[in-house]
Image (cartoon, rainbow, N blue to C red):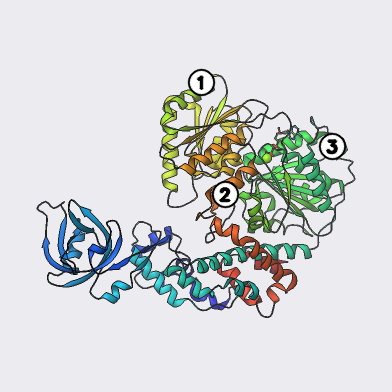
């Protein structure tokens, strides 16, 4: 249960003053449905103004507050023309306050002739005349104007204005209670941070590094704490030590020797599985690094020890492909492997369920259908999750609840997560890395081209397809409600354009399609019926298409380098030569260009991820876009780098040495921050276990 003290913070924004049905949509679009969301909607920047007694003292282009005497109103002859209010400063300098369109009504009301007004805005020059276009504020009293010297600027959506958001923030601040302090007293004092309530208030009032850092720390701390709690409760769970004797693995007839990295990972995994506390391990390795065979060997360890194993894939098509690969590889061992997806119904499904229950099926591959209530196992010992970033932390944890005793869990990912972030995203797991590709792989020939060269690029794709090969065409789609519609429109427009040129050879798959439609499109491409696949990022979990050796990525600058690398890995899996064309917009910044150039020089996903983090630095948020993980909504990259270790250490100390949530002084506060920052899955698992 959410702590009572948080009730006002989780109240709906509907209850705030001035919110009618008209504002509901714009607020939802920004995710501001509860008071807490408004409080955490921190300003993007501040306009800092300077009060001047006369305009001689101000520079053109400067944000100023100045007292002006209103002299005259001049309407334009044409209705589209400007409406000017002529005014003079203390020295008699003339300044025009210029309005367009309906704004002139405001001007008439706010600026009566003969009166003095304090005007805030940006000083401009038009011909020889000083002017302020659409003043930000017009006040009758100087005190009112002085209140506007530092003004927060918020991210808006259509239908919202700055004053409206400011008013919601103001009301939300009034409702915000003091919360008990969850920060370790040592850290709190050393950093000289304000209390939570004070920090939120300050962060809305002006540039304030300490306040912002504290709020970022809170998020990192809550995240770390939740992961630690999961890890701790996992440690206490009863697992099943599984010691394989190798009799099945010995029968495998792999067509290749394992790489050193694969062997090392298998050793680490089987070492964990032999313990009585359940394994929680992440296997990281580039696309094509050979994770499947590591999964197979791990599952065979479980089977050798008399248990069953289950492998979970994010899509039906991928599950099917895994099933076929594993079945073929494992044939000499004689183990029984089954496929179970949501599509299986009736008899076939019944017989698989029976097999899992009576133990005649050793390994099952499937979509989340394999973890439904109705599916019972005789003795599930190991769960492998492929492309685990497609599953949230909480889902990841649900899976671990299946079975009499908690099964061992192996999560796999091709996302090259920078070292700094592994802890933040996977603090509850141990990590194995496949940092060595199977021999004989060729580097992917990567080129950066401006979008202006589109015609040449389409022609190149044409030649590629005529030579009998296939190609991916990737258009970015960001999981952000603001741009998603535009992104889909862009992908659809590109699809239409390519279709005109290539006809039925082109197929479109994007994130908004129903799973069956996605799978159907992917299947056509995988079967070679379609030659060109236009896709958004969904193909990061795509199936193998050995014949697809060319990839075009549009608006490449919008992707994180790690993600670009993961995408292009799709064409670099075999021994054939493959090409990746990164199309950039023509007006790209220096850094943007530099970033893309890195893609040409390196094929090392981890290095690219680290470099990207360094290059971008700054205020960027770690949304899902960059990391492919749940990410942070308050802490910026810079703050993560600065504060993550501290937050982790504090969370670890609280959990391991100070009794965690049962700590008499800070336990309740810690619970509060978990709920406040919506990491309460940390608390839930505790109760479950
Ligand atoms: P991923 O890590 O992307 O899941 P896969 O497991 O699908 O990669 O492996 C990619 C390809 O590399 C497969 O065709 C697989 O058979 C092959 N492969 C895996 N390990 C090796 C190895 N040690 N030597 C040569 N080829 C390998
Ligand atoms: Mg794979």
Residue 185 appears in which quarter of the rendering?
bottom right
Specify the farthest residue to the left: 77
The percent position of residue 629, horizontal first and vertical second, equals 59, 52
Query: Rounded to the nearest whole Å, what is the CA distance between mark 1 and mark 2?
Result: 38 Å
On residue 463, the disc is 1
| Quadrant of the frame with the N terminus | bottom right
**In terms of sequence position, does the residue under pointer 1 or pointer 2 come before the other?**
1
Label drawn at residue 614? 2
Q: Residue at x 47, y 67 (%)?
A: 208
Instruction: Give residue 81's mark.
Output: none
**Picture quarter with the C terminus:** bottom right
Residue 171 percent across, percent down from the top left: 40, 74
Is disc 2 surrounded by few (<14), some (14 to 19) or many (20+) residues within 10 Å? Answer: few
> From what the image shows, is residue 417 above or below residue 258?
below
Q: Is residue 43 left or right of residue 255?
A: left
Q: Secondary structure at mark 2?
A: helix
The residue wearing badge 3 is 333
Q: Report, in whole angstroms, how far the alpha carbon at label 3 lies from the one at label 2.
A: 47 Å
CB-based contact (under 8 Å), mark 1 and mark 2:
no
Q: CB atoms at circles 3 and 1 under 8 Å apart?
A: no
């Amino acid at each position: 249960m959410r702590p009572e003290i948080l009730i006002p913070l989780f109240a709906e924004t509907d209850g705030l003053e001035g919110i009618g049905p008209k504002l509901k949509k714009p607020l939802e679009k920004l995710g501001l449905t509860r008071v807490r969301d408004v409080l955490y909607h921190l300003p993007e920047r501040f306009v800092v103004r300077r009060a001047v007694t006369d305009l001689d003292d101000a520079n053109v282009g400067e944000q100023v507050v100045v007292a002006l005497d209103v002299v005259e109103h001049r309407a334009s002859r044409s209705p589209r023309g400007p409406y000017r209010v002529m005014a003079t400063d203390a020295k008699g300098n003339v300044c025009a306050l210029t309005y367009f369109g309906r704004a002139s009504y405001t001007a008439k009301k706010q600026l009566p002739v003969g009166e003095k007004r304090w005007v805030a805005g940006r000083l401009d020059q038009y011909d020889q005349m000083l002017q302020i276009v659409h003043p930000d504020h017009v006040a009758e009293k100087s005190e009112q104007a002085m209140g506007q010297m530092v003004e927060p600027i918020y991210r808006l959506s259509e239908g919202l204005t700055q004053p409206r958001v400011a008013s919601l923030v103001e009301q939300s601040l009034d409702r915000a209670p003091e919360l008990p302090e969850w920060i370790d007293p040592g850290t709190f004092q050393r950093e000289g941070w304000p209390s939570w309530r004070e920090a939120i208030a300050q962060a809305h009032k002006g540039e304030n590094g300490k306040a912002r850092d504290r709020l970022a720390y809170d998020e990192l701390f809550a995240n770390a704490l939740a992961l630690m709690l999961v890890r701790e409760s996992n440690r206490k769970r009863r697992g099943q030590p599984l010691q394989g004797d190798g009799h099945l693995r010995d029968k495998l007839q792999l067509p290749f020797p394992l790489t050193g990295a694969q062997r090392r990972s298998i050793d680490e995994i089987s070492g964990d599985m032999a313990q009585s506390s359940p394994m929680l391990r992440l296997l990281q390795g580039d696309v094509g690094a050979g994770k499947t065979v590591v999964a197979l060997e791990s599952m065979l360890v479980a089977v050798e020890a008399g248990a069953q194993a289950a492998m979970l894939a994010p899509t039906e098509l991928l599950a099917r492909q895994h099933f076929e690969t594993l079945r073929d590889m494992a044939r000499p061992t004689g183990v029984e492997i089954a496929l179970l997806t949501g599509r299986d119904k009736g008899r076939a499904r019944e017989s698989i369920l029976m097999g899992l229950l009576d133990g005649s099926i050793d390994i099952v591959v499937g979509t989340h259908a394999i973890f439904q209530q109705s599916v019972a196992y005789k003795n599930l010992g190991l769960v492998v999750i492929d492309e685990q970033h497609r599953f949230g932390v909480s889902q990841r944890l649900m899976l671990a609840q299946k079975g009499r005793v908690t099964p061992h869990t192996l999560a796999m990912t091709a996302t090259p997560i920078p070292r700094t972030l592994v802890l933040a995203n996977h603090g509850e797991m141990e990590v194995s890395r496949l940092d060595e590709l199977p021999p004989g792989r060729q580097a992917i020939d990567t080129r950066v081209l401006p979008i202006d060269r589109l015609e040449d690029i389409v022609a190149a794709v044409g030649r590629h397809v005529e030579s009998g090969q296939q190609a991916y065409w990737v258009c970015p789609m960001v999981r952000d409600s603001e741009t998603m519609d535009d992104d889909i429109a862009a992908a659809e427009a590109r699809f239409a354009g390519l279709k005109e040129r290539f006809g039925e050879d082109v197929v479109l798959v994007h994130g908004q399609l129903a799973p069956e439609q996605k799978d159907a499109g992917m299947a056509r491409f995988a079967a070679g019926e379609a030659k060109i696949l236009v896709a958004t990022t969904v193909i990061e979990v795509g199936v193998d298409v050995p014949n697809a050796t060319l990839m075009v990525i549009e608006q490449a600058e919008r992707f994180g380098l790690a993600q670009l690398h993961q995408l292009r890995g799709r064409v670099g899996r075999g021994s054939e030569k493959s090409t990746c064309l990164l199309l950039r917009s023509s007006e790209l910044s220096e850094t943007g260009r530099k970033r893309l150039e890195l893609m040409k020089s390196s094929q090392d996903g981890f290095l690219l991820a680290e470099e990207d983090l360094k290059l971008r630095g700054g205020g960027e948020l770690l949304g899902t876009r960059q990391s492919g993980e749940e990410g942070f909504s308050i802490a910026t990259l810079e703050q993560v780098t600065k504060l993550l270790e501290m937050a982790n250490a504090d969370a670890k100390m609280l959990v391991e040495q100070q009794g965690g949530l049962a700590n008499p002084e800070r336990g309740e506060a810690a619970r509060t921050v978990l709920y406040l920052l919506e990491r309460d899955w940390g608390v839930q698992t505790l109760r479950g276990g």
